Image: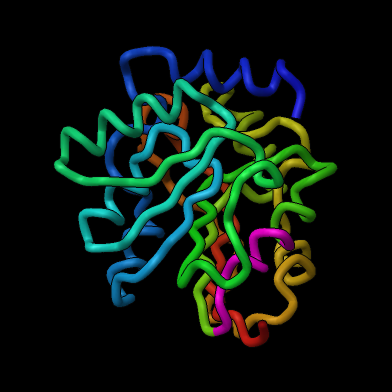
Amino acid sequence: MNNSWTQRWDDRYSNEEFAYGKAPNNYLKDQLEKLNPATILFPAEGEGRNAVFAAGLGWKVSAFDISAEGKNKAIKLAEANNETIDYQVGELDSLNYHTGQFDAIALIYAHFPAEIKSVIHKSLSTYLRKGGIIIFEAFSKKHLEHIAKNDKMGGPKDIGSLFSIEEIQADFPDYEIIELEEKEIQLNEGIFHKGSGSVIRFTGRKLKD
């Protein structure tokens, strides 16, 4: 990713206020509470709200982001909650995760650039063990309609960075689909996720190594 992309997220996370709040995403919370704690990876984790929540449930948490500012706030949030998370800064192909390392991967508003998002999904899938769980929530392509009505609502403004059900099916083909839907929801997550939005929600179990 280019420096302007990294700078964008450093700028967003450099303020004292947490851009998306300190509470976990509701969908992630609901799904994690159904599972026995094990090892979990949070890609594009930003300021750490979801990773810290998972650690509080007893999960062994790994996370990464391209933003050093995001990591700084995530570590402070973890310390404030007496939790420990392993948080790395960098792009996925520069990190030291290995095949089958994780029991779960949580992709929560992990909007990567359009030209690499499927490649990243398929790479991440190799780090999940057979039988492991993907938990995914991100804005759908219909979300542009919500942004048009409320320009303060967060989310990418280019359709290529948004998701469809068909894209998720293509990116994660060897999964048992536990849940996969496009849904309109109300978000109240910090200052950048506030209002109505259209999302894709996916929970799946990996069937093959």
Q: Residue 123: which quarter of the image?
A: bottom right
Residue 129 is one of the magenta-drawn residues: yes
User: Against 105, is 90 above or below?
Assistant: above
Residue found 73% across the figure and 62% down from its top = 122
Q: Residue furthest right?
A: 115
> Looking at the image, what colour scheme do you see?
rainbow
Q: Nearer the viewer, residue 172 or 197?
A: 172
Residue found 53% across the figure and 33% down from its top = 89
Q: Is residue 105 left or right of residue 161?
A: left
Q: Position of residue 183 (x, y in %)?
A: 55, 59
Residue found 43% across the figure and 62% down from its top = 40
Q: Nearer the viewer, residue 27 or 58?
A: 58
Q: Is residue 149 left or right of residue 60?
A: right
How many numbered marks, from 0 up?
0
Residue 133 is one of the magenta-drawn residues: no
Q: Residue 169: which quarter of the image?
A: bottom right
Q: Residue 109: which quarter of the image?
A: top right
Q: Position of residue 146 (x, y in %)?
A: 60, 37
User: Against 17, is 82 above or below?
Assistant: below
| Quadrant including the N terminus | top right
| Quadrant including the C terminus | bottom right
Q: Is residue 196 left or right of residue 138?
A: left
Residue found 61% across the figure and 45% down from its top = 95
Q: Which residues make up the magenta segment?
A: 122-130
User: Against 107, is 165 above or below?
Assistant: below
Q: Position of residue 201 (x, y in %)?
A: 54, 62
Q: Position of residue 74 (x, y in %)?
A: 35, 33
